[in-house]
Image (cartoon, coloured by chain):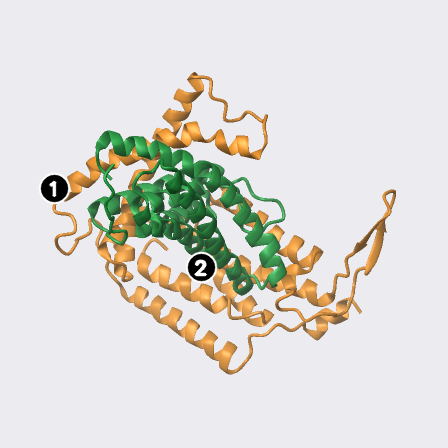
Chain colours: A green, B orange
Amino acid sequence: MAEKKKSIWKFGTREVVFAAIGAALYAVLGYATNVLQLPGAGNVSIRPAVVIPMFFGIAFGPIVGFISGFVGNILADLLSGWGFWFWWDLGNGIMGLIPGLFAGMIVDYKAVKSLLLGELSVILGSGVGMGVASLSEMWVSGADMNTVIFANFIPSFVSNIVNGLILLPILMVAYAAVVQRSGRN
Amino acid sequence: MDKIDPRARWIFSFAFLLSATMFWNATFLFIFFILAIIWYYFGKTKWKETRHGWFLISIMLFSMIVINTIITGGGAGGVVPPGGHVIWPQKFTIPLVNWEINFGLTVERLWFSLCQLMRLGGISLIFLLIPYTMDSRAYGATFHGLGMPDNVAYTMELAIRFIPTLARDLSVTLDAQKARGYEIEKVKGGIFKKIARIAPLLVPVTMNAIIGSEDVANAMDLRCFGQAKRTWIYPLEYHWWDYALIGFSALMLVGSIVAAHILDLGGFWTPEWFMNLFA
């Protein structure tokens, strides 16, 4: 496959549709698993669907990744009746945006280097995204730093990186086959 | 509630969120809480519709207030000063196992948990109402009206339209995989195996959605999407009551900034009468 430089900040018609698909997928899959609350952790649930914004970021760039996470989390929360929690939506958006920053470096989605970059982006994205969302609890619910770290950040970060590290390479390898078959990237 | 413009409702909701989170003073939080109850009442939602949402919110409130504030004290650490008037034994031993528990519940922490209940309860009342009372078809026009670029606002509208299709695809894929012997409910194996077991469901649904989206993008391109200023199927129009609500929201926000940051009235304090209850 010929190496070519991708523009990661483009947001044309295809990106609009991919962002909408990513957000809807995240909402549907997130809704299906939103009831699995982590015991003792405030505002945190186990969602294998977190891999969707990460994957859409890696595949289609940071804007698509951000919208998939941000809008998808809003829709998943609205569908589950959770209401609207802006900072957690923003955190989920960042979780898709940071992997998107790696999109320009990835051409062959099943190459070992690409998979390792993907895994790195999962750790960075989850760390920054959940960090921002968890810190918001200091402002909204008045929690101290210990509570923020142990009740919000660690449960959400660990849950998200475990889901992301396992599922992202599977989606990347599957997408490599789709790209090869369709001839588009 | 249905007659209020969705843009005015989002503005009010955000102004409420920003205003309420400036205070730990119970008097102000009580006013916000009453305001939220009145707002929620105007939504005219039925318990049958919202009970699932309230169940999830009560789990969150239990975790934040009972576990984090009352039992462990962590939730109060950032606001309630250390020390205080202990009303529950500092230490007690669990019979039979002889475990020593350092509990030390104070009057201040108990009052803080009431403040948390009013603040988080008020925010929940305001935002829980949105999915039950706002027409999702108007989301695109609403966010465009609030200043979002056309492309981003349309993405939101498109995402809502895709949800039923993708939910159906998910259900069909699940049935098809089950017919091949796939067992998502299988409890055997550790957490890693359980997550990996999602893949036979996740991969086909995601890849089919991506392949199908090419057709949608081509159709949009053929209709010159993004080439000119967009119009919306459900145009929004402000009425006098919407302006009144936006004005009230602005007043609430400015008043809160003045009270909390200029007059310094936002801080946490425990009233004397509450202290006397435990004297």
Find residue B50 and name its label.
none
Residue topped by disc 1: B222
Question: Which residue does the numbered mark 2 point to in the structure image?
Answer: B39
Residue B119 quadrant: bottom right
Labels 2 and 1 share a subunit = yes
From the top left corner, tell me how far across and down residue B196 is, in percent: 49, 31
The local crowd at label 1, few if under 14, some if 14 to 19, many if 20 or more residues have their Cα within 10 Å, is few
Instruction: Give the chain letter at badge 2.
Output: B
The mark nearer the N terminus, 2 or 1, is: 2
Chain ID of residue with mark 1 = B
Q: Position of residue B224 (x, y in %)?
A: 12, 47
In this view, B11 is above or below B47:
below
Q: Which image quarter: residue B215? A: top left
Q: Is residue B37 visible?
A: no
Mark 2 against mark 1, which lies toward the viewer? 1
* Residue B251 visible in the shown view: yes
Quick check: A81 left or right of B145?
Answer: right
Quadrant in the picture for residue B79: bottom right
Residue shown at 48% from the left, 59% from the top: A132
